[in-house]
Image (cartoon, grey):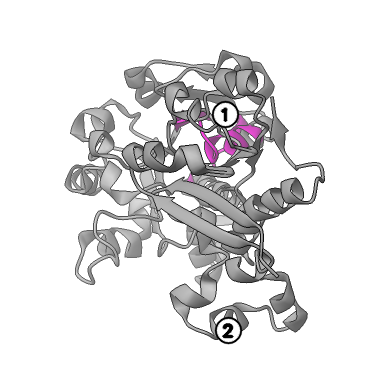
């Protein structure tokens, strides 16, 4: 029996859209089983491959890296899947056969929604579980710094309360979140839940982005400020923008020099966004209050890198983690399945999830 033909165009230079349904291809045949929680061996059945999901179809899959490639194939596409790319309306107009435009991530600014509406193409934007994990990691780093948890651990190990008194931690400089201003460089998929967390802690939150989102500012309790101002005003500055040629080392000595003397610099985005030498120099000179880093200019972080020494001495208030912020049970699997299950919903004439209008 002939299988129905299906053409899918994917434009994703990061790889998250297909990673979770190609886990075994990427990491070996036992990759999923090795990563299963011991208490949930049956979960393997909940992580099908792309081929298993679409076993009933003859799929032609175009994995595009450039707009030109998308433009070349979109006329034949039944489904278009995007992740962090900007699709011009004139290109979308060529997709006369499209049955769904599916975006990975709630920040779907790259979809020309007006064009999609005119063409009657449904659009969906599924949340990134991967990015929610990063937002949680960010917040853990922030609270770790504000509450000085590494220092408190040493305090207890050394029985410091015998000298200073039980509960007397004034020398450690414990800070209250409600007294801080959170600055977000970028207001996308990771920054938005962080703004929600700030609301819960009654913190002031400000943001800068290449696009302003006035329709989101009240909902997330954030204020838009210009580039220099986000660096000047923030007590906690978190970088959440993508790495592109134009953002390479976008954070340099100028930006770091604008920060408050006690401000914390947080980066879980990409190490190459930052002039790392300038950051190290500022930390060594105690020019800023500290740093919490999950990403580095060169990865893995070289064994002899000065950031290790800064991290090892608690007086520097530097925390580094091994690019682990994204990790959680099945983050990539859940992200990919959110996309491809929506495609299956369309094929089965079922309602799609996370539809946007």
Helix, strand or loop for disc 2: helix
Horizontal side, residue 195 vs residue 231: left or right: right
Q: Which mark is residue 253?
A: none
Q: Which residue is mark 2?
A: 34
Quarter of the image where the N terminus is located:
bottom right
Q: Between marks 2 and 1, how big is the CA–CA gap? A: 44 Å
Q: At 62% from the left edge and 83% from the top edge, which residue is drawn?
A: 33
Q: Is residue 182 magenta?
A: yes
Q: Which residue is mark 1?
A: 179
- Dot 2, crowdedness within 10 Å: few (<14), some or many (≥20)? few
- Which portion, as a residue range, is magenta? 173-196
Can residue 149 be seen here? The reply is no
Circle 1 Cα neighbour tier, 10 Å, few/some/many (<14 / 14–19 / ≥20): few
Front-most of 60 and 290?
Answer: 60
Q: Outermost residue toward the front?
A: 1
For residue 233, what is the image quadrant?
A: top left
Q: Quadrant of the C terminus?
A: top right
First in sequence: mark 2 or mark 1?
A: 2
- Residue furthest to the right in view is 350
Report how many numbered discs are placed on residues in the image.
2
Q: Position of residue 99 (x, y in %)?
A: 65, 38
């Amino acid at each position: 029996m002939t299988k129905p033909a299906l053409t899918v165009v994917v434009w994703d230079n990061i790889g998250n859209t297909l990673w979770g349904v190609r886990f075994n291809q990427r990491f070996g045949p036992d990759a999923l089983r090795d990563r299963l929680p011991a208490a949930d061996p049956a979960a393997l059945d909940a992580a099908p491959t792309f081929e298993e999901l679409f076993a009933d179809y003859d799929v032609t899959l175009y994995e595009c890296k450039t707009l030109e490639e998308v433009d070349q194939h979109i006329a034949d596409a039944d489904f278009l899947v995007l992740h962090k790319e900007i699709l011009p309306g004139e290109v979308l107009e060529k997709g006369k056969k499209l049955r769904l435009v599916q975006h990975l991530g709630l920040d779907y600014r790259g979809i020309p929604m007006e064009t999609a509406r005119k063409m009657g193409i449904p659009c969906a934007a599924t949340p990134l579980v991967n990015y929610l994990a990063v937002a949680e990691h960010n917040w853990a780093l922030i609270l770790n710094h504000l509450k000085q948890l590494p220092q408190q651990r040493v305090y207890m190990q050394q029985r410091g309360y015998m000298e200073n008194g039980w509960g007397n931690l004034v020398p450690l400089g414990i800070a209250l979140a409600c007294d801080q201003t959170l600055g977000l460089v970028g207001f996308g998929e990771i920054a938005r839940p962080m703004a929600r967390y700030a609301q819960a802690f009654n913190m002031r939150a400000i943001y800068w982005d290449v696009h302003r989102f006035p329709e989101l500012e009240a909902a997330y309790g954030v204020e838009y400020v210009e580039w220099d101002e986000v660096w000047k005003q923030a007590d906690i500055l978190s970088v959440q923008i993508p790495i592109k040629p134009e953002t390479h080392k976008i954070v340099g000595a100028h930006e770091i020099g604008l920060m408050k003397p006690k401000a914390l610099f947080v980066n879980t985005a990409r190490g190459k966004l930052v002039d790392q030498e300038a950051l190290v120099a500022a930390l060594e000179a105690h020019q800023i209050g500290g740093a919490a880093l999950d990403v580095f200019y060169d990865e893995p972080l070289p064994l002899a890198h000065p950031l290790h020494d800064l991290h090892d001495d608690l007086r520097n208030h530097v925390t580094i983690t091994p690019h682990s912020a994204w990790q959680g049970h099945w983050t990539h699997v859940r992200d990919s399945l959110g996309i491809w299950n929506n495609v299956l919903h369309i094929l089965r004439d079922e309602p799609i999830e996370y539809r946007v209008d």
